[in-house]
Amino acid sequence: MIPLQSLPGTSWLDDLLHADYRLLLLVNQELQHPILDGASLILRESLVHAPFYLFLGLFMMINFGRQGFWWFVTALALVSTSDYISSHIIKEYFGRPRPCRDVIMSQHIRFLARYCGANGSFISSHASNHFTLATFIYLTLRHLGRGWWLVFPWAASVAYAQVYVGVHYPSDVIAGALFGALCGWLGAVYFKKRSGTSKLYP
């Protein structure tokens, strides 16, 4: 185990980083379970979520026609924007190594993923993209039924999987989720006011 206790004279930032490391080890090691091992790997695969995306797109277009089509286009544009900003701007700016590529941390974690990405760790694009979609879906479709809040546990499970398999720190996915929620909220506000699809809403 890595000695991660706080030391006298350390800054608050050091304390936060130590807490981040401890939480990673808790999720990655102490909370491990064979079922979670398999489930986390599955949740990380984009193809696993494709049926849901397809169903949602068809649902919107069948029920709302052209309005539903532009809803789907807006959702895709939001995810593309979230992915680009998180992957090519934020990650490159911070340049934080992933735990599976960190010289010290990589020796103390269970690495379960097929590969460890060469791009930065902060923020998690998986968390950002899924929370962008979850927030946009909920804010634009919640009037259709009560069950749309379930998109948030779905997004959270994807974010948790990134920490569990050892490719991200907890702070990476938390920041990614917050950034994604902001993107989704801004997208929903813009969609409602500017896209000419106000008939979708009460």
Image: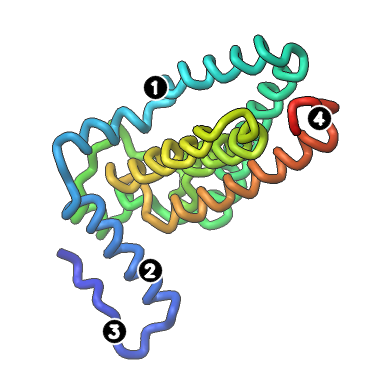
| Neighbourhood count class around disc 1 (C-alpha, 10 Å): few under 14, some 14–19, many 20 upward | few
Residue at the location (19% across, 66% down)? Answer: 2
Mark 3–mark 2 Cα distance, whole angstroms, equals: 12 Å
The earlier-in-sequence mark between 1 and 3 is 3
User: What is the number of the mark on residue 7?
Assistant: 3
Find disc 1 in the rendering and name its residue. Answer: 48
Mark 4–mark 1 Cα distance, whole angstroms, equals: 32 Å
Find disc 2 in the rendering and name its residue. Answer: 17
Mark 4–mark 2 Cα distance, whole angstroms, equals: 45 Å
Q: Amino acid at mark 1?
A: Val
Q: Amino acid at mark 3?
A: Leu
Q: Nearer the viewer, residue 191 or 62?
A: 62
The relative height of residue 48 versus residue 63 in the rendered view (above or below) is below
The earlier-in-sequence mark between 4 and 1 is 1
The earlier-in-sequence mark between 4 and 3 is 3
Q: Secondary structure at mark 1?
A: helix
The earlier-in-sequence mark between 4 and 2 is 2
Q: Amino acid at mark 2?
A: Leu
> Cβ–Cβ below 8 Å for labels 1 and 3?
no
